[in-house]
Amino acid sequence: MRRSRYFLPTLKETPAEAQIASHRLMLRAGMIRQSSAGIYSWLPLGLRVLRNVERIVREEQDAAGCQELLMPTVQPAELWRESGRYDDYGKEMLRITDRHGRDMVYGPTHEEIITEIFRSYIKSYRDLPKNLYQVQWKFRDEVRPRFGVMRGREFLMKDNYSFDLDKDGSRRSYDNMYATYLRTFARMGLRAIPVKADPGAIGGDMSHEFHVLAETGEGAVYYDAAFDDLDLSGGAESVARLQGLYAAADDKHDAKACPVPPERLRNARGIEVGHIFYFGTKYSAPMGAVVTGPNGESITVEMGSYGIGVSRLVAAIIEAYHDDAGIIWPAGVAPFPVGLINLKVGDAACDEACAEIYATLLEHSMDVLYDDRDESPGAKFADMDLIGLPWQVVVGPRGIKSGRVEIKERKSGQRQELSLESLFAKLPGELAETGLALLPG
RNA sequence: CGGAGCGUAGCGCAGCCUGGUAGCGCAUCAGACUGGGGGUCUGGGGGUCGCGGGUUCAAAUCCCGCCGCUCCGACCA
């Protein structure tokens, strides 16, 4: 993409309202635009990141045996009355009336809708288990939205719902999601600690929140120091082992009853990026989600629900990966894997070299942001650092004279000069495969 | 929802106390120079001063009401 044509309104100055790094950087990098309190437009660069996060979430959901569907944002109040939550949910739920005077709600979550779908079609125990997910916008009319998309009123969430015949099955579904969540967050470069949590308005009797530790986190978590040395990528450590270790959200933590000795207890702030619930028959019972069992009996299904804050994750990743100059995107979520900087637009040799590199990158399916604007070198470097692309290819008159371009890694700041030939030699191999192997070592 | 604060150009702000032609920096536009970390010069454009009412010869400025936004606390992916 040519920067001169790309809609990327970066800001040199920080908007006054932004209190935390991710909010500041998302505004400055031209990723989002506030529409009203807690409600944002996603501009092209931001949307690219959001889509990348979504993609990883989807891949992990699919790999875990979940199937995607899409439910409506606007839901009939009737279903919420059935579950008993219409009155329970409070002012956080946005209530709307349609032209016929019918009560509707803008969905803050989708247990009611999915249960209604399930009960309409699934009649036999032989069709269980089922696990359905969606990635959909939610609206919760937060009293005090803040920190940009970290706590917006409108937010994008992956939510899924498991249906099982019995508790054991439901427990397997729960643990499956537990491991899936660890893998999902790990793929975005995040270490998320699973902590026992209060199920809150969703209800139920077992629940874990996944917290990315960060000073700007809104919640306090207490955990066994053993977590600091564990592999949380959802692979090596067993779910049972992790669940056996103590970690609790502050509303679940009781200093007197805590099994962890004080010297091993850690207290930190965390960003809640995921939350899983097992709630048994809380919705299936009142809403009549039952299947016929092997002996012809009626069995109320056991349910769980599982949420990942997709839009919040974008902010959480930035909280975890930035420096004074801007964002440092981890592999996989970066809006572009590589940026190309032409330091002297209008100079025939620079223009030509850039055009060649640009075309070659595209040939190898490398999505590249080519800064072809007639700006000062400093402005371009600062801008490129701000938006945090993992790799920068720098083409300037000084290097071109000796037939060389510079490759810079955003994360380490490490630079290396390469001849055009050796750059192109890398393209079919390491670069094209990983998108991230421009530098040896 | 309780407490505090702020609304003046795209962004950051000054002006308000003490009423009298709406300003600064950045950004933007035109041209020229420049070219390895937000460069320089010249010239230009852009404002219902959040909205409504009141006081006054005169309101960004004083008064009243409303709306919006932000921050601090109680709730949540």
Image: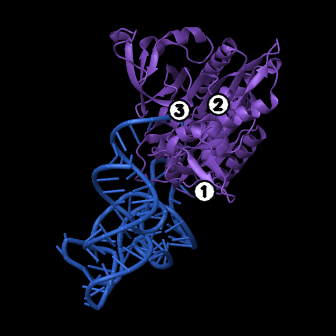
The residue at the far front in this view is A297
Name the residue carrying label 1. A373
Image coords of residue A388 (percent x, y):
55, 40
- What's under tag 1, amino acid-wise? Arg
Asked if B11 appears above or below A272 in the picture, the reply is below
Q: Are marks 3 and 2 on the same chain?
A: yes
Residue at image x 64%, y 51%? A103
Picture quadrant of residue A189: top right
CA–CA distance between discs 3 and 1? 51 Å
Q: Amino acid at mark 3?
A: Ala
Q: Earlier along the polypeptide chain: callout 2 or callout 1?
A: 1
- Give the residue type at disc 2: Leu
* Residue in view at x 46 percent, y 13 percent: A246
Indicate which disc residue A201 carries.
3
- Which numbered disc flags the more N-terminal residue, 3 or 2? 3
Instruction: Tell me, by letter, which chain the rendering colours purple.
Output: A
Residues tagged 2 and 1 counted as in contact (Cβ below 8 A): no
The answer to whether mark 3 and mark 2 are in CB contact below 8 A is no
The residue labelled by disc 2 is: A436
**Residue found 52% across the figure and 9% down from its top:** A244
Number of numbered discs visible in the structure rendering: 3
Res. A75 image quadrant: top right
Tag shown at residue A108: none
Q: Colour of chain B?
A: blue
Q: Are marks 2 and 1 on the same chain?
A: yes
